[in-house]
Image (cartoon, rainbow, N blue to C red):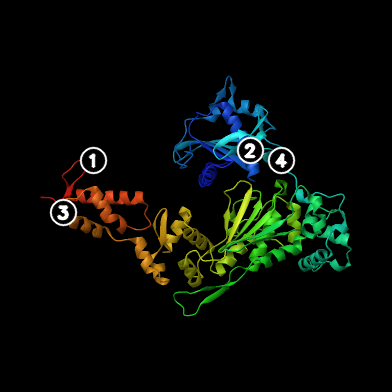
Amino acid sequence: MEETELIELLNDLLAQPQEQQWLEFKLNGATKNEEIGEYISALSNGATLANQPYGYLVWGVENEKHDILGTKFVFSKARNGNQALELWLRNLLTPKVNFEIFEFPCQQKPIVLLRIPSAKGEPTRFKQEAWVRFGSHKTKLSGHPELMRIIYNSQEDWSKKIIERASLADLDETALKLAREKFKERKPELPVNSWNDKTFLDKAGLAIDGKITHAVLLLLGKPESVHYLSPAVAKITWKLDTEEKAYEHFSPPFLLNTEQVKNRIRNVKHQFFPSHELLATTVDKYDPKTILEALHNCIAHQDYSLHGKIVVTEQTDKLVFENLGTFFDGKPEDYLLGKKTPAKYRNEWLAKAMSNLGMIDTVGYGINRMCQSQRERYFPLPEYILSEQQKVILHIYGKVIDEKYSNLLIQRGDLSLEQVLALDRMQKKQPISEFAVTDLRKNKLLEGRKPNYFISAKIAKTIGQTAEYTKHKALNEQYYRDLILSAIKQHGEVNRRVINELLSDKLSDLLTDKQRITKIGNLIYKMKCAGKIVNKGSDHKPRWVLPA
């Protein structure tokens, strides 16, 4: 890799919110050689568990703030006894791991980066022991058989497995008929009506030589035939979690029953009242196509080796979709913008079959369509939560978080999806990238300092939020200086506690308590340097008076 490519890769790694199962930052060469071997094992296995092609071990980066500090460690010169460290490690790793070593400068500071291929089909071991990471802790993989199983199954497509004892009699006739209709819609040029059931199932990518696969049983199987999938769980649970409580379980055939799940969700009308219009704007709380898209994605991407069910929770303000497994192939942000096509699927056979029946999009536009639908209906964008290991959670909002952003979407149809995504993150109080900040500032959509960004004066005026803008922007420094001088004239002198109490509630409500104290301290320092006030006390206990 060229130096520019390495720096770009490093920046991508630094953008991670924290260390991952597949990513470890170190500073100098304090790590023992044995530990390096264990880290290579853990990061290789962690990459497989997180569906990442590589794990990374990086020296020269502080592991909390991700500051580039450089390292004194030089991997290419390191040794274990009389043997080069690289050769020593390669001899003790099984199966053979072709990790790559890169040594390069970044910000004029030396960096060492190991790129480690993910484990395939079996765990990566160092000295015959497999390792894995949980948070910042490294532990033996042997204590976690469920993770061991995932790694062993990493090259196996569960959905393509044939169920030898199952037959056409185990398929639901109504589902099979609908599957023909859906496939014909997708492939109108084919003589679908002339095929028998066996030929159709083969042509549609559901069966293999007429034999029933896990995929066909999920989509078209009778509820009483689900036992063939055991120990995998073929079940969708709908839960109502509001003032009312309810639930219902749904089994295959999922081609039919996902429609039933959708129909259990209460989809009322929502009204927006734009500040510049007299009439309300009315939309559905949820887009039915978005519900099915999210639900079908759960089915396609579920890790059935974890033996859990898919859960759809209906809350007052949103729908929560949960499926087991990690987010496969990339990051949600890539798909929200419609810029990524998945290179692989966890359940390749199932995904292909669902695509042939019009249930999902295998080009990567499905998530983007959900995003566009939410935008067009002025709701917050879909949000993926990946904080739990081996679980993907998707929030689809059916209620406004911040009215001014919805008003902005109603009035500004010219905003790019990238801008809408950044503004959406702002309303959710989530961090946005430096690139997004620069773009929003350039287009006069944002003001404030990191992390307390807020809507700009131009937009605030446009959507009737001037009062709140002023509250965030706060008052100018001269006003604060006048308050301090007035207090000194009235009392003769004031201490720091009095000044804090005087100004604290008048500063911008976006500032934290610590930031308020710092701002007040800077203001006092400027006034002292300008000769406006004089300290008659000590540095530890100042007493501020007017100059003689």
Q: Which residue is drawn at 22% across and 41% down?
A: 539
Pick out the residue farthest to the top.
82
Using the numbered discs, state the Cα–Cα distance from disc 4 to disc 3 in whole angstroms.
74 Å
Mark 4 or 1, closer to the camera: 1
Check disc 3 and report its element: helix, strand or loop.
helix
Pick out the residue farthest to the bottom.
278
Instruction: Please report whichever mark, 2 or 1, sits nearer to the chain's N-terminal start.
Output: 2
Instruction: Please report whichever mark, 4 or 2, sits nearer to the chain's N-terminal start.
Output: 2
**Residue 205 seen in this snapshot:** no
Mark 4 or 2, closer to the camera: 4
In-image side of 102 versus 259 (left or right): left
What is the three-letter code of the residue carrying label 1?
A: His
Check disc 4 and report its element: helix, strand or loop.
helix
Mark 2 or 3, closer to the camera: 3
In-image side of 452 versus 215 (left or right): left
Screen quadrant of the N terminus = top right
Q: Residue 44 carries which label?
A: 2
Residue bearing mark 3: 491
Q: Residue at x 15, y 56 (%)?
A: 489
